Amino acid sequence: MAQNELSRLLHAVNELKIPHACSGASAWVSVSAGAIEVVPAATMSPRELLDAADQLLYRAKREGRNRCVHRASAEAPTQVITAD
């Protein structure tokens, strides 16, 4: 479910064509995101959840930006969502 929303976000930002004059990566502003969906559990702290999402964010940036790396649960494989 989150995949659809993440894809919509990426496409919506691309369609805005906001100039990004200070970027060497692209002439337009883009989105890179890390997203994880979990059912809250007493064994997972908020910090662990943020750290997991942060790792996914940096993977998105390493793999080319303008994308979201998403995990549907803590055990699920990651999925890469792009605006292309």
Image (cartoon, rainbow, N blue to C red):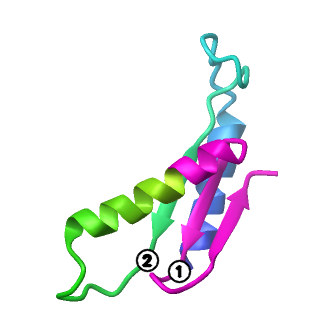
* Residue at x 23% of width, y 63% of height: 47
CA separation in Å, label 1 and label 2:
5 Å
Measured from the top left, where is residue 53 in percent x and y?
A: 42, 61
Counting residues from the start of the chain, the first of labels 1 and 2 encountered is: 2
Numbered disc total: 2
* Residue at x 33% of width, y 87% of height: 39
Residue occupied by mark 2: 37
**Mark 1 closeness class: few <14, some 14–19, many ≥20 residues within 10 Å:** some
In this view, 25 is above or below 81: above
In this view, 37 is above or below 66: below
The amino acid type found where label 2 is placed reads Glu
Q: Nearer the viewer, residue 53 or 82?
A: 53
Q: Are marks 1 and 2 in contact (CB under 8 Å)?
A: yes
The amino acid type found where label 1 is placed reads Ala
Q: Nearer the viewer, residue 59 or 82?
A: 59
Measured from the top left, where is residue 79 in percent x and y?
A: 67, 71
- Find the magenta span and give its range: 58-84
Residue occupied by mark 1: 72
